Image: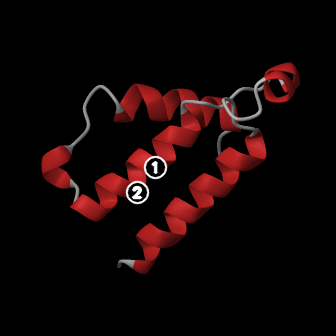
Amino acid sequence: MRSEYDVETFCNAFEEVFYPDVPFDELTAGELLLFESLAEVVVRFSPFSEDLKTYPRVYRSEEEVKEAVNNAATKLLQKK
């Protein structure tokens, strides 16, 4: 993640762009799986430490989102 967006903004934008119009016909099966895996982390992001403490297996932290984004980007770049 190049830090052009804060994590909360990225998560909100990802949800607004990816879910309504998943471009099934433009993604390979591997890319789709990669984005779905990223989405599982992104949609569970919470900026609230209380959420993370109370429900550690439900909500994801800023660091977890950054790690998921970096992993996805690395895998996508390796395919080129």
Q: Give the Cα separation between the discs numbered 2 and 1.
A: 5 Å
Question: Does the image show residue 34?
Answer: yes
Question: Is the residue 61 above or below the residue 59 in the image?
Answer: below
Disc 1 designates what residue? 37
Report the residue at 51% width, 61% height from top. 72
Q: Reply above or below: 14 against 72.
A: above
Q: Callout 1: 10 Å neighbours few (<14), some, many (20+)?
A: some
- Seen in the picture, residue 58 relative to 65 is either above or below; the reply is above
Residue at the extreme left: 25
Residue corresponding to mark 2: 34
| Left or right: where 15 falls relative to 21 | right
Q: Secondary structure at mark 1?
A: helix
Quarter the C terminus occupies: bottom left
The amino acid on which the numbered mark 2 sits, given as a three-letter code, is: Leu
- Report whether 63 appears left or right of 69: right
Task: Return the x and y of residue 68 as percentages of the image width and height.
Answer: 60, 54
Q: What amino acid is at disc 1?
A: Ser
Inspect this view and state whether residue 2 appears. no
Question: To which quarter of the image does residue 7 belong?
Answer: top right
Q: Residue at x 45, y 73 (%)?
A: 77
- Image location (x, y in percent) of residue 49: 87, 26
Disc 2 + disc 1, Cβ < 8 Å: yes
Residue name at image x 47 percent, y 40 percent: 39
Q: Residues within 10 Å of mark 2 (few under 14, many from 20)?
A: some
Where residue 1 appears, as percent x and y from the top left, is 64, 56
Q: Secondary structure at mark 2?
A: helix
